[in-house]
Image: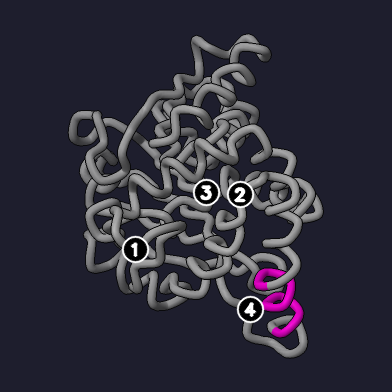
Amino acid sequence: MDQVKPYSQDKGKKQQVSSMFDRIAPYYDLLNRVLSLGIDTRWRRKLVRKIAAQKPGQVLDVATGTGDVALEIHRQLPDSLITGADISEEMLEIGRKKVAKKGLTAQIRLQAGDSENLPFPDNTFDAITVAFGVRNFEDLDLGLKEMNRVLKKGGKLAVLEFSKPVSFPFKQMYNAYFRYVLPVIGRLTSKDPRAYSYLYESVQAFPDGEDFIRILKNNGYKTLENIPLTFGICTIYLAEK
């Protein structure tokens, strides 16, 4: 996977991603709704539905951001204990306020956590979710190995990530929107000229579909499935330890 970074090539990707999300945190939720035309909430619901059947008691949401997936997990699995981890403290702070407003601080804990060095013991979680996060890992293999380490045997990993549509003319429309329209809207709204250009570049560089399935297998996962959503704009990947 090519190392696409938000800003300078001189600094590490992890540090740059953290700084980028700290910068755009106040605008993140609104931009998600606007730029995806509200479809992102449906994608997250489908992601959580894929782990809900097993009724996991302990769930980890990696790259939790402002906590939308963690809150959706609670909505579908009200008896589960949910931990959200992220490297952006500004995103986490917004998420904590959302959790507190709903009175869910006993059920949902959001904390600082690096996907490549998760602060949890081996075999802790019954399920792990990641929504639009693996694309931002500095070391994809290491991040997947870490999630495998903290996942219990037989536990499920559910990943939601952008992918690249292949059918005409949706592929061309998608590329034009992501490459030209979305960065302009993002720049005007979030005041960060690079954040949404990086989004397009990182999606193009990400090994989606069967390529990502192979990477999951190489990092210790089995029972693998990929489910394209909305003409292939994004994909849910399911795996077990």
Q: Position of residue 79 (x, y in %)?
A: 53, 20
Q: Position of residue 233 (x, y in %)?
A: 65, 68
Q: Residue at x 56, y 54 (%)?
A: 195
Residue type for callout 1:
Gln
Kindly indicate whether the residue at mark 2 contacts the one at mark 3 (C-beta within 8 angstroms).
no
The verdict on residue 3 being magenta is no
Residue position for label 1: 9
How many C-alpha atoms fall within 10 Å of the one at disc 1: few (<14), some, or many (≥20)?
few
Against 151, residue 239 (above or below) is: below
Q: Of helix, strand and loop, which mostly describes the magenta segment? A: helix
Disc 3 secondary structure class = strand
Residue position for label 2: 192
Residue position for label 4: 165
Q: Upstream in the sequence, badge 2 or badge 4?
A: 4
How many C-alpha atoms fall within 10 Å of the one at disc 3: few (<14), some, or many (≥20)?
many
Quarter of the figure that contains the N terminus: bottom left
Kindly indicate whether the residue at mark 1 contacts the one at mark 4 (C-beta within 8 angstroms).
no
Disc 1 secondary structure class = loop
Kindly indicate whether the residue at mark 4 contacts the one at mark 2 (C-beta within 8 angstroms).
no
Residue position for label 3: 131
Residue type for callout 2:
Asp
The residue range painted magenta reads: 172-179
